[in-house]
Amino acid sequence: MDILNALVAFLNFVFIPAAAYGAQLALGALGVTLIYGILRFSNFAHGDTMAFGTAITILVTWGLQALGISLGPLPTALLALPVGIAATALLVLATDRAVYRFYRVQKAAPIILVMASVGVMFLMNGLTRLLIGVDEQRFADGERFVINVRDFKAMTGLAEGLALKTTQLLTLVIAILVVWALFWFLNRTKSGKAMRAYSDNEDLALLSGIDPEKVVRLTWIIAAALATIAGVLYGLDKAFKPFNYFQILLPIFAAAIVGGLGNPLGAIAGGFVVAFSEVAITYPWLKIAGYLFPGWQPDGLLQLLGTEYKFAVSFVILIVVLLFKPTGLFRGKSV
Amino acid sequence: MKKFLLATAAGALLAGAASAEDIKLGISLGFTGPLESMAPAMAKGAEMAMQEVNDSGLLMDGTTVVAVQGDSTCADAAAATATVERLITAEGVKGIVGGMCSGETIASLENVAKANGIVMISPSATSPALTTIEDNGLFFRTSPSDARQGEVMADIVLEKGINSVAVTYTNNDYGKGLADSFQAAFEEKGGNVTVNSAHDDGKADYSAEVAALAAAGGDALVVAGYVDQGGSGVVRAALDTGAFETFVFPDGMVGNAVVENFGDEIEGSFGQNPAAEGEGRETYLKMAEEAGFDGSGAFSAEAYDAAALILLAMAAADSSDPAVYKDKVMDVANEPGEKIMPGQLAKALEIINGGGDVDYVGAAAVELVEPGETAGTFREVSFEGGEMKVIGYR
């Protein structure tokens, strides 16, 4: 029984939250890595692209709710998501036309594009705040739990409870579907192959008749879709606040770099590595240790780092990876 | 058009003439920030006291009082300091109802109010640090220190038969002061605090903080935070993961917002906030209802009292100079004298103008002890069936 209790406590406080958070980071990192692989710069505006897409989705969700449309047990935001993606795609295509294309034509150094993306970041930052304000918004509706603690305890008779939120399950399912669709697209379709060819060797791709502008457009549209989906899932699971989407940029970059920038598989692995490290390092293992080793009574909480230092974990991972394996776990491009 | 211009010019002249005799009082509260849902009812309370005095026309031969609002943000000490600076230097206020939160109040008192010799009466800053602060006799508060709230809360928790609790506090002067005073009182009375840890406001997700609290264990969770901020986030995460089912809410969390956020999910939770029982409070609630706002909000009654105290002290000193009337605040608040309830400010002014003494009781049973703060009565509430119920006063 004690081992089961330890397992349930681990699932409830470590595994489920970290898995959902990891999936959100992975989707965000996929967008960053895609842009790095094909357009060859680190897009600092990605966090705010997520925020913009989520803000539009929330506005449409409110509209749908006002009309009385809902998805039953699922959040209404899922219905609004395509509109959010479309609006975000239009916005990033417009920024590409207005900002990035100018530098691309000049074949500017990547660092210039990165700095331009910092400017775009601040613009989008302001745009989102004008659109929806700075306050926290909660827009999850429908059924809150797939399994809630009270039912689980009554069902199993265990001392520990297990909660699985609808949004957590939804995050994992959607992340798997999106990743599957992305890999199918990149590996099986003509446009996907064109994107990979362009990523491998720009000039060679040009010679084989691939239209670079079309590849760039496709990349932005896919990145916008990934960003919006990641942002909406994060907002549904936690809460939407523009400032938090700016902060989440750090773990997303850590994830992309740990996995290897430019490598989609790496971005997914990186997302989960960062999420599980953040949660596991700040989690006090006292309770679980108590179930596993009943005779042992340690003084402290068996917590490696206080929860205030959660963001420091991504920093440390980032530094360690850059020092010892600059290409990341999955052999991306060197940073 | 010409007539219109003339009329406007005349109007401006008249207004100018009238305002020459006005006294300005500042209201420095956190209209934005972690307690923004409480601030409007507090400001209305303070303004109601000023209106009452204006209507009577008895303050220093018919001087009128004008309220000037400033946003102290509650959380940002620099912004609060700038706001109070503006109120004093640009608006020329003669006294301030505020600040709202402890850290911000300490900063604006030390940096601006003390330097300019302006009286501040805070309705809601409750940090124990404000008891011992060097204030030149300029600072008062109509709410009790958290040292007292910590003791009251410890008593309530123990009486519910709960001997072991986890404590989380918002990472600032208010939260830390309250959490520490509670822990000291609770342990002295034989209870056990399993963990006393901070949470930061404004995060998207508090599951990590709650996981730490849950690992330490305890039969209830004391949330010394803000209802519009991390406090609610912590409660949400604790409910979602099933870490805690019973919560203890001190003053920053007791409000209708907590009922709106959680409804019957917090069944059996309880808390307390400084609020007085009795005639004064009843009267105040009625007055507030007539004026069109909810007087039962936390610290609304205290704000009314803070404004009333400043005005009565001015009347007693027959001067709006803070350096003069600051010595009269304790006199009008305490015995001897005729007891003054809310709505009786006109009567109080008559007595003072006739040379008599008043003992201001007001909406929150004001009884100031040295160095100028309320001894404190607390309202005990519990949450049952999705509603907040008042259990009693202590």
Image (cartoon, coloured by chain):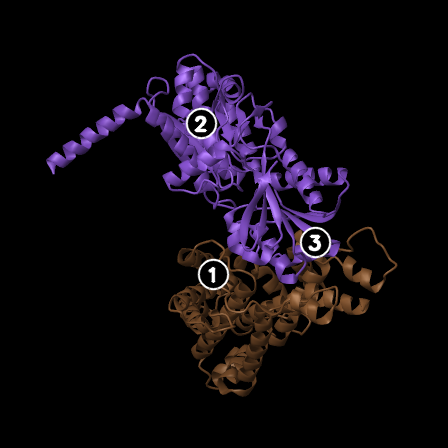
Chain colours: A brown, B purple
Q: Is residue A256 visible?
A: no
Q: Is residue B164 above or below residue B72?
A: below
Which disc number belongs to residue B213? 3
Provide residue B279's location: percent of width, then percent of height. Answer: 49, 32
Q: Is residue B343 visible?
A: yes
Provide residue B354's location: percent of width, then percent of height. Answer: 40, 13
Residue A332 shown left or right of residue A304 in the figure = left
Circle 1 Cα neighbour tier, 10 Å, few/some/many (<14 / 14–19 / ≥20): some
Residue extending furthest toward the top = B355
Subunit ID for the residue under disc 1: A
Instruction: Give the distance between the C-alpha atoms of the residues marked 3 and 2, in whole angstroms.
Output: 43 Å
The amino acid type of the residue labelled 1 equals Ala
Q: What residue does disc 2 label? A: B308
Q: What residue does disc 1 label? A: A116
**Tag 2's secondary structure?**
helix
Same chain check for tags 3 and 1 = no
**In this rendering, the label closer to the viewer, 3 or 1:** 3
Same chain check for tags 3 and 2 = yes
Q: Quadrant of residue A188?
A: bottom right
- N-terminal of the two: label 3 or label 2? 3
